[in-house]
Image: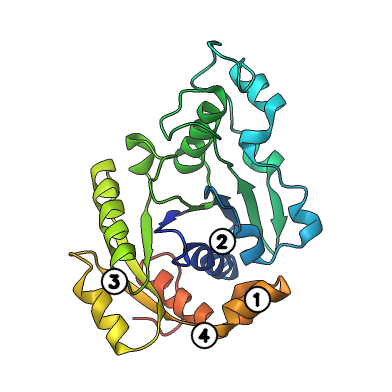
Amino acid sequence: MAKIAVAGKGGVGKTTFSAVLAHALTAAGQTVYAIDADPNPTLGQALGFPEDLLAKLVPIIDMKDLVEERTGARPGESGAYFRLNPRVDDIPSRFSIMHRGVHLLKMGTVRGAGAGCVCPENSLVRALVTHLLLRERETVLLDMVAGLEHLGRGTAASVDVMFIVVEPGQRSLTVAADIAKLARDLGIRSLWAVANKVRNDVDLDFIRAHLDGLPLGGWLPRDEGVVEADMQGAAVYDSSPDLAERVRAIASDAGLIQVAGAR
């Protein structure tokens, strides 16, 4: 099954795209592990998970007992020795929550530390991402931060497709170019831009003119259904049929699903 990463500047709508894509993949018959690796984790809400179920989801980094059990050191222990390759194969099934066929895991953020932090909790998270991308048999969808901090060269090469979500604006497109360069350096070969919040042809032409060679996989309009879904705590996939159809077409063109009548 496919290994998919979604990245982009904060606020461009990558979590919305990730949520709709996850539901499109499950609707196509795939079992999906959706991994919220964003420091502002809202993927569960965009997927429409009930609040009482989301309350049971604890970020992996915050599971101090688990971190200690698997690495041999408690988070925050200064100078402690810990395992760099802890056992993680049981974590996806044991610590994810499931709704409508999507299994959700939340990674969490190492507080007060840089992306390269050498600490037991970060060791566990990196080992888990490696397992998900290299050994997990189901479809894995990573909602990433712009810096791709959880990916190493070996694991990134196992990403089948990376979508970089952009919006009309120089900052978004500059970040996208930086992400694309880093992704190529790490060995990710299939890179697609997804234009979001497009209002008109002027917006779309602006994005196309500034993609710097990054292929455009498709575009999504500004959609009030996204706002309605957020207000109601509903899945964006249900609240915006047009958006869902466009994401299905993008997934089909990237070879992730088969859509009847697709080219």
Give the CA separation, mark 4 to mark 3. 19 Å
- The amino acid type of the residue labelled 4 equals Asp
Q: Is residue 63 left or right of residue 213?
A: right
Asked if the residue under mark 2 is in contact with the one under mark 3, i.e. CB atoms within 8 Å, the reply is no
Foreground mark, 3 or 1, reads 1
Label 3: few (<14), some or many (≥20) within 10 Å? some
Name the residue that disc number 4 marks.
242
- The amino acid type of the residue labelled 1 equals Ala
Asked if the residue under mark 3 is in contact with the one under mark 4, i.e. CB atoms within 8 Å, the reply is no
Give the CA separation, mark 3 to mark 1. 26 Å
Give the CA separation, mark 2 to mark 4. 21 Å
Asked if the residue under mark 4 is in contact with the one under mark 2, i.e. CB atoms within 8 Å, the reply is no
Residue 138's label in the rendered image is none
Please tell me whether residue 93 is drawn above or below residue 20 in the rendered image: above
Give the mark, 3 or 1, whose residue is nearer the N terminus: 3
Q: Nearer the viewer, residue 11 or 235?
A: 11
- The amino acid type of the residue labelled 3 equals Leu
Q: Position of residue 261 (x, y in %)?
A: 41, 85
- The amino acid type of the residue labelled 2 equals Gln
Give the mark, 4 or 3, whose residue is nearer the N terminus: 3
